[in-house]
Amino acid sequence: MSRPSLFLTTALTTAAVTLGPIAASAEGELNLYSSRHYDTDERLYSDFTDATGITINRIEGNGDELIARMQAEGANSPADVLLTVDTSRLERAKSEGVLQSVDSDVLEARIPAYLQDSENQWFGFSQRARIIFYDKTEVTNPPQTYEALADPAYQGMVCHRSSTNVYSQTLLASVIEHLGEDAASDWAQGVVDNFARKPQGGDTDQLRGLVSGECAISISNTYYFARAIRTDVDGLPAEARANIGWVFPSQNAQGAHMNLSGGGVAAHAPNRDNAVRFLEYLASDQAQQYFSAGNDEYPAVPGVGLSPSVAQLGLFKPDDVDLSEVAKNVPAAQRIFNTVGWQ
């Protein structure tokens, strides 16, 4: 499989964009189970309804809770589509039998193979790179790779989320995929030894730790910082952000680790055709650009323009490892977390 091109710093155009492959008209409804909690997604849903006439009924909640609910509902589940965050949850939904395979020429053509399940049960529609941020006033030689986060030179400098967070789990699962369990365990121990504080908070809190001086180095998904560029975020004023630098890790090796937001058609979808149509809409240029403009994410479809806030982060090489294989390493990652004391 060829490696994806560098993301281009292309500004989002304001010209009207067609819905692309989605049908011009339809009817009926769609029952959407979603753990995406972003107000900006309202535009995604309203545009789909305006274009198709399909009414979207939403159930929102935590991804794990929604998967459990679909399991409990079984064949009587009203769910047509599950949208959730992180490959590990998408893979869990597949393993628990709450998704079904989809045969769509549109999705196959537009979503790169490494961003979709090998059996077409889930597809990634937006991405976030998990990268290294640092205090430029404290760190003159920031780590250039994930492995370097374990370097004793950074002892007492690193802040990170807890081991229970899916982003933490998937990052370590990716290290396992690339380096093997033994090396990944050594890496995790080294990162723990370099912690500036106990793991805590969300990704924005890791960035705030740089501003407060609790941390000199932190790890966060790109869209949290891009959002602070685009709009006011408490604790991340412009003057403080000016002292924050960032590194897209491992650019001379595998590339930057990517987290996905994606979805699939529910196993017992009562409105299956509408569900497939909705997934195809999420792969359209219009929806892909809105993921970037509305929520500061990277599109999954190659060649789609980026919003200015995302483009400001610059060019980088993403890791094109098969994310479904990475997700299989999550149980091993949790064992390593427990062993090294990563709380």
Image: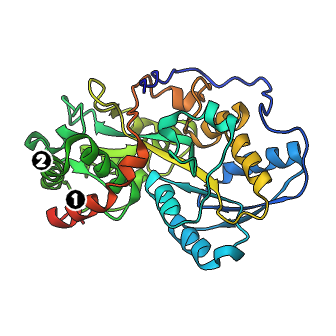
Query: Residue type at mark 2?
Result: Gln
Residue 180, percent from left and from top: 20, 46
Residue at 89% x, 58% y is 28
How far is the residue under mark 1 from the one under mark 2? 11 Å
Can you tell which quarter of the image residue 139 is in? top left
- Marks 1,2: beta carbons within 8 A: no
Query: Residue type at mark 1?
Result: Arg
- Dot 2: within a 10 Å radius of its alpha carbon, few (fewer than 14), some, or many (20 or more) residues? some
* Left or right relative to 42: residue 241: left
Can you tell which quarter of the image residue 142 is in? top left
Residue at 58% x, 65% y is 98
Q: Earlier in the sequence, mark 1 or mark 2?
A: 2
| Quadrant of the snapshot with the N terminus | top left
Give the SS element for disc 1: loop
* Left or right relative to 22: residue 101: left
Residue 268 disc label: none
Residue 261 visible in image: yes
Residue 155 disc label: 2
Residue 43 visible in image: no
Residue at 52% x, 21% y is 9
Number of dots carrying numbers: 2
Colouring used for the render: rainbow
Residue 118, percent from left and from top: 50, 44
* Left or right relative to 187: residue 318: right
Circle 1 residue: 197
